[in-house]
Each structure stands twice: as C-alpha cells, then as structure tokens.
Image (cartoon, rainbow, N blue to C red):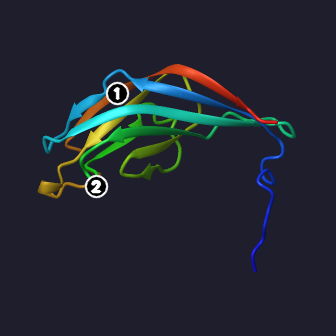
C-alpha cells in the first residue's frame, strides 16, 4: 500500500527557518597519524511554526569537515561546556552533529584524537584541542 501526501502536509504551519552559520577560528589540524583535518564550518537550523511557540532548545549543531579517513575516523567532537550538550552525537565521514541546548555567538568545541594503531579507544583520548566556532551569518528562509 502506498500513501501519497502533499509536499507541505507536515509543514503547513512552518513560517520560517533561521540558519546560523559558524566559522572556526582554526580550520586545519594535523592529526596523530599525520593526516590533515580541514574544518569547513558549522550550521544550526531552527524552524518556527505559526501554531505553537518555537522553543529554542535541543538544537543540532552540525560541524562539516574534510578528512582522508573513510571509516574509523580517529577524532571526535564534543562541546567544551558539557552542560550545553545533551545525549549522543552522530558520526559521519563528512560531518558530525552535536546536540546543544543553546546557541551562543561563539561555541567552544573539543577535538579529541585517538591513535588506532595503538588500539586506544575513545575512552582514552591521546590528544585534545579546543576549536572556537564564531557565528558569522544568520539567514532566514520564509515559507508561504
């Protein structure tokens, strides 16, 4: 059985979306295995609806990066302010999503590296660095 829904069936109360773009203060990092990690940017989207108050909490903060690693990415990101991050996070080859409670003009993220050659797991990071993301642009997309 196949159901067909109009394209706007789930979003008929969506009025606009704010997209916040953040840029890192440090965009290149040499990792323990001598590969290079290039951090491109981070974004967060907030949808606003006409039928209810939008609560700006539990926000996705997506960090985009370029790395030569195709699997077993030897680094992890987490918020420096652990009270601002909740739950888990996603690990993808080109981006990482963190779940934050609030967005500030600058967000400090910890980059944790591990050395898989020595069979060291995520519980024992070998190297950490702090990367500051600064809000650079806010765009608003309005819907009919």
Q: Which mark is residue 29?
A: none
Quadrant of the rendering where the C terminus is positioned: top right
Q: Is residue 100 left or right of residue 34?
A: right
To which residue does mark 1 refer?
Answer: 131
Q: Secondary structure at mark 1?
A: strand
30 above or below 124? above
Mark 2 Cα shell of 10 Å, populated few (<14), some (14-19), many (≥20): few
Q: Label 2 near label 1: C-beta < 8 Å? A: no
To which residue does mark 2 refer?
Answer: 70
Between disc 1 and disc 2, the foreground one is 2
Residue closest to the far bottom: 1
Image location of residue 109, percent across then percent down: 39, 32
The one nearer the camera, 30 or 4, is 4
Q: Is residue 32 left or right of residue 70?
A: left
- Res. 121 image quadrant: bottom left
Q: How many marks?
A: 2
Image location of residue 132, percent across then percent down: 39, 24
């Amino acid at each position: 059985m196949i159901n067909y829904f109009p394209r706007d069936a789930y979003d008929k109360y969506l009025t606009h979306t704010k997209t916040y773009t953040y840029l890192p203060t440090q965009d290149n990092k040499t990792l323990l295995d001598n590969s290079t990690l290039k951090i491109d940017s981070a974004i967060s989207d907030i949808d606003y609806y006409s039928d209810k108050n939008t609560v700006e909490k539990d926000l996705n903060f997506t960090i985009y990066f370029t790395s030569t690693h195709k699997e077993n990415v030897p680094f992890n990101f987490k918020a420096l302010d652990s009270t601002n991050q909740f739950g888990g996070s996603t690990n993808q080859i080109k981006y990482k999503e963190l779940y934050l409670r609030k967005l500030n003009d600058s967000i400090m993220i910890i980059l944790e590296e591990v050395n898989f050659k020595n069979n060291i797991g995520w519980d024992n990071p070998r190297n950490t660095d702090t990367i500051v993301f600064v809000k650079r642009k806010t765009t608003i997309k309005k819907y009919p």
